Image (spheres, helix red, strand yellow):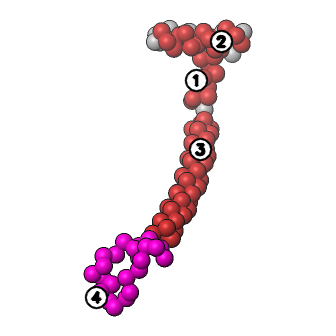
């Protein structure tokens, strides 16, 4: 297989990352770049990336649905707690004039 020689300019941070990737594996920088280009330019590469992104989005969607369900459960629980907590005390919070207009005996706090 013949190879074409290319001279490229990359940012210094990319060059450092390329060194950190190639040196420990014992491969040349050219081999790493060739593999990256082959993956990027392959016709199935886009489908694989799209499938990976779709999988991640599905997982995030399920997590958000679970969070929404849990939040609704918490809201209902707090609403029930507040309702039943205020139910007995609301009778004593009404003004005395309310009891006079509806002919209900005024409750005493000592009972």
Q: Earlier in the sequence, mark 1 or mark 2?
A: 2
Q: What is the spatial separation of the Cα atoms under label 3 and label 4, in whole angstroms?
A: 63 Å
Q: Earlier in the sequence, mark 3 or mark 2?
A: 2
Label 1 with label 4: CB-CB less than 8 Å = no
Q: What SS does tag 4 mark?
A: helix
Compare residues 99 and 22 and report the one nearer the observer. Answer: 99
Quarter of the figure with residue 25: top right
Compare residues 97 and 16 and report the one nearer the observer. Answer: 97
Q: What is the spatial separation of the Cα atoms under label 3 and label 2, in whole angstroms?
A: 29 Å
Q: Mark 1, residues whose alpha carbon is within 10 Å: few (<14), some, or many (≥20)?
A: few
Residue where numbered disc 1 is placed: 37
Q: Earlier in the sequence, mark 2 or mark 4?
A: 2
Q: What is the spatial separation of the Cα atoms under label 3 and label 1, in whole angstroms?
A: 24 Å
Which portion, as a residue range, is magenta?
A: 87-111
Q: Which mark is residue 22?
A: 2
- Residue at the (57%, 29%) spot, across then down: 40
Q: Nearer the viewer, mark 1 or mark 4?
A: 4
Residue where numbered disc 4 is placed: 101
Q: Is residue 106 magenta?
A: yes
Q: What is the spatial separation of the Cα atoms under label 2 and label 4, in whole angstroms?
A: 88 Å
Q: What SS does tag 1 mark?
A: helix
Q: Nearer the viewer, mark 3 or mark 1?
A: 3
Q: Earlier in the sequence, mark 3 or mark 4?
A: 3
Q: What is the spatial separation of the Cα atoms under label 1 and label 2, in whole angstroms?
A: 15 Å
Q: What SS does tag 3 mark?
A: helix
């Amino acid at each position: 297989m013949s190879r074409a020689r290319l001279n490229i300019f990359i940012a210094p941070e990319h060059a450092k990352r390329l060194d950190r990737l190639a040196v420990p594996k014992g491969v040349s920088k050219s081999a790493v770049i060739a593999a990256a280009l082959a993956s990027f330019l392959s016709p199935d590469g886009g489908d694989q990336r799209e499938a990976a992104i779709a999988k991640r989005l599905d997982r995030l969607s399920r997590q958000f649905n679970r969070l929404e369900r849990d939040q609704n459960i918490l809201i209902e629980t707090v609403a029930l707690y507040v309702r039943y907590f205020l139910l007995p005390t609301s009778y004593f919070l009404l003004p005395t004039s309310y009891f006079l207009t509806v002919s209900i005996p005024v409750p005493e706090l000592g009972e």
